[in-house]
Amino acid sequence: MKVMTCKETRENLSNYLDQAVTWEQETALRRHLAGCDGCTEIAEQLQGVRELVAAHGRVNPPPDLALRIRLQVSHCSQITFWNRLTVRLDNILRPVALPATAGLLATVITFGVMMHTFFTRPLISEDVPVSLTTPPRLRTSPSLTFNTGDEGIVVEANLDNQGRVVDYRVIIGSLDPRQLSELRNILVFTQFEPATLFGKPTYGRTVINFRRVSVKG
């Protein structure tokens, strides 16, 4: 029977404690642990950690976990060059607040894109002309179950290229923790027609006004 080295033993300790090894592997592991104090100590430490984690029981995930995961997936997904450039320009120009400079820079970029498209596409095309950009449009959204008052709740939401909310901030309204949790769940199930750039879905931003007023009488 093959004799396991310390490296092989430590790589298989987790499966060994889970009883997910073959009979031959278990026998070899037991023989090695019986004669190796270093690997035995590591196995005991690993078992202690497993018992400590099990003693704390199951932890319920936070209510906004789905939105956080969607946000992380959106950040890790492939983003086109123009989307990255748009986000960077927005981050740079927002604190400075120079509308004229932003407009000039946007005009230069748009002109460059149009010139690139003009020289790289054939002069005769059967493509259907599309708008340069279109904003996102609300498709479906669950209704609120709590009273928002006369002002309502106004939320600025960032959307991915599939029309799903990946991040948000409340710009008008005050919510307690329960209402904030419900708002997050609503945003998870809110779906938009995505914004488009040259006819292709892209990332976008929109403002949503939630309002529910209960009248007693």
Image: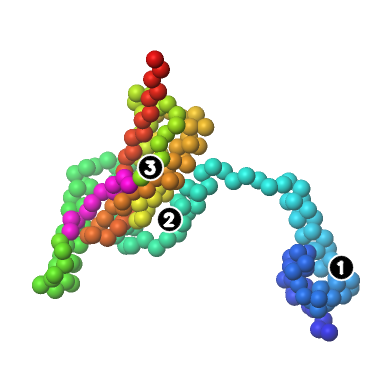
Residue at the left extreme, as displayed = 124
Residue at the bottom extreme, as displayed = 1
Residue at the front extreme, as displayed = 217
The kind of residue tagged 1 is Asp
- Give the secondary structure at mark 1: helix
Q: Is residue 172 left or right of residue 41?
A: left
Rendered position, 17 above or below 195: below
Q: CA distance from mark 1 to mark 3?
A: 61 Å
Residue 208 placement: quadrant: top left
User: What residue does disc 2 label?
Assistant: 74
For the point 77% across and 60% down, which residue is it?
46
Residue at the right extreme, as displayed = 34
| Residue 49 pos. (x, y %) | 76, 55
| Residue 129 pos. (x, y %) | 15, 61
Q: Which mark is residue 141?
A: 3
Q: Is residue 194 left or right of residue 62?
A: left
Task: Tell me the magenta residue range.
Answer: 130-139
Q: Quadrant of the N terminus?
A: bottom right
Labels 2 & 1 near each other (Cβ < 8 A): no
Q: Which mark is residue 37?
A: 1
Q: Tag 2 or tag 3, which sits nearer the N-term?
A: 2
| Residue 99 pos. (x, y %) | 22, 42
The answer to whether residue 168 shows anywhere in this view is no
Labels 1 & 3 near each other (Cβ < 8 A): no
Neighbourhood count class around disc 1 (C-alpha, 10 Å): few under 14, some 14–19, many 20 upward? few
The kind of residue tagged 2 is Ser
- Give the secondary structure at mark 3: loop
The kind of residue tagged 3 is Ser
